[in-house]
Image (tube, helix red, strand yellow):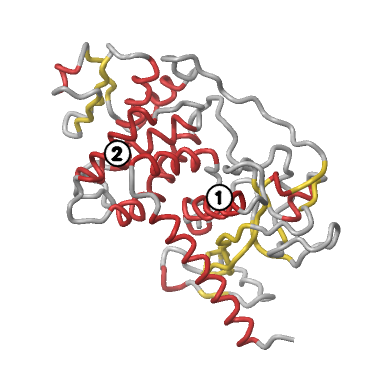
Amino acid sequence: MATKEETRAAHEARLEELHGQLTGAVETLVTGDDWARALSFAARFRSRSFNNTLLIWAQHQQAFEQGRVPEPTPTLVAGYRQWQALDRQVAKGQAGYMIYAPVTARFASANPSDSTSWRRLAPREKRKTNEVERSRMVGVKPAYVWDVSQTDGEPIPEPPAPRLLEGQAPAGLWEGLAAQVTAAEFDLVSVPGAAAIGGANGLTDYMAKTVSVREDMPQAARVKTLAHELAHVLLHGPDNPDAQGHRGIAEVEAESVALMVGAAHGMDTSGYTVPYVSGWAASVTDTSPVEVVKATGERVRKTAIGILDRLDTLKVGDGTPPGLSKAVQKDGAHRTATTARTPPAPSVEHIGAGEPATAGRRL
């Protein structure tokens, strides 16, 4: 039986392996085309963190190259017991994709507004009657998930997906984005053409609190531009303490958010986004492309998810198998499924909304 030191060393080794895989995946995303592909994929796996999305993508690509899965891109991903809950079983010999899962602990405080007053509760300890209790993420651990192509069993029902005709915008998307611009206390203005706003397709004026969009473009282009400008409103205002100072980074972020919002509705914006992102990323002369990707990936994802969560529109799936019961809160995982019906040891990989947003964070 392994000692505590051996268990800890194995745990740290797996986390180091994850970090290496993540770094390798990020380093491939140094061109506009790769960045667009990654964001489109992230939009279809938006229930998971950007880091875990890249890890799943990279490991599935490797599995495809090894002939273990039939398609180069994963479609639906879940944990071992989650697949069992859908009457599917991980096929014997199929290796799971290792991702980060949160480790949480319980904390209690009699004065919640005082950040120094919180104390960590022991495993079976109960809070005092005058205290409030909250869970916080205190670390990470490896967990494993499998793509549907690595499982056998009952068919997965396919939800309806949006279908667009060329030039059209998804139903209700313009109205939903416009409502969010208004909710941010900006006025939405239609202008006759690019000449009215300095040659641009759209323009956000923080001083006048206006968002302008050309009206002489196809519907799809107008709605993509509106998503881009909404991202500027949410991310780059002068009162936003997290706003980046370099305009190139701001433009990469805004266009990346627009790409994710579009991809979640079945829109392909890459024809415009790829050269746009490539040009602005290249302008960030004091930062390497890899660092730009690392700095913007999760920030872009969170902003896009916030926009999408407020839209009452038909979207593509988020990578979670349809029909997976929200009552199943924990998943178990082995690196490799060795027998058809042997349940694995439990872990803390969650379902539904992906990794829990404990303390306002996703892994």
Q: Would you say 279 lies left or right of 50 here?
A: left
Q: Is residue 21 above or below residue 171?
A: below
Please name the amino acid that badge 2 sits on: Val
Q: Is residue 272 above or below residue 74?
A: above
Which residue is rendered at x = 58% and y = 51% of the image? 65
The residue where tag 1 is placed is: 61
Residue 327 rendering spot, x and y as whole percentages: 74, 48
Which residue is rendered at x = 38% and y = 33% of the image? 258
Which residue is rendered at x = 38% and y = 56% of the image? 27
Please name the amino acid that badge 1 sits on: Gln
CA distance for labels 1 and 2? 24 Å
The residue where tag 2 is placed is: 277
Q: Residue furthest right?
A: 341
Q: Nearer the viewer, mark 1 or mark 2?
A: 1
Residue 163 rendering spot, x and y as whole percentages: 55, 20
Please tell me which residue lies in front, 170 or 177. 170
Residue 70 rendering spot, x and y as whole percentages: 66, 43
Identify the element where label 1 is drawn.
helix
Q: Would you say 22 lies left or right of 295 here?
A: right
Is tag 1's residue or tag 2's residue first in the polypeptide sequence? 1
- Crowding at mark 2 (Cα within 10 Å: few <14, some 14-19, many 20+): many
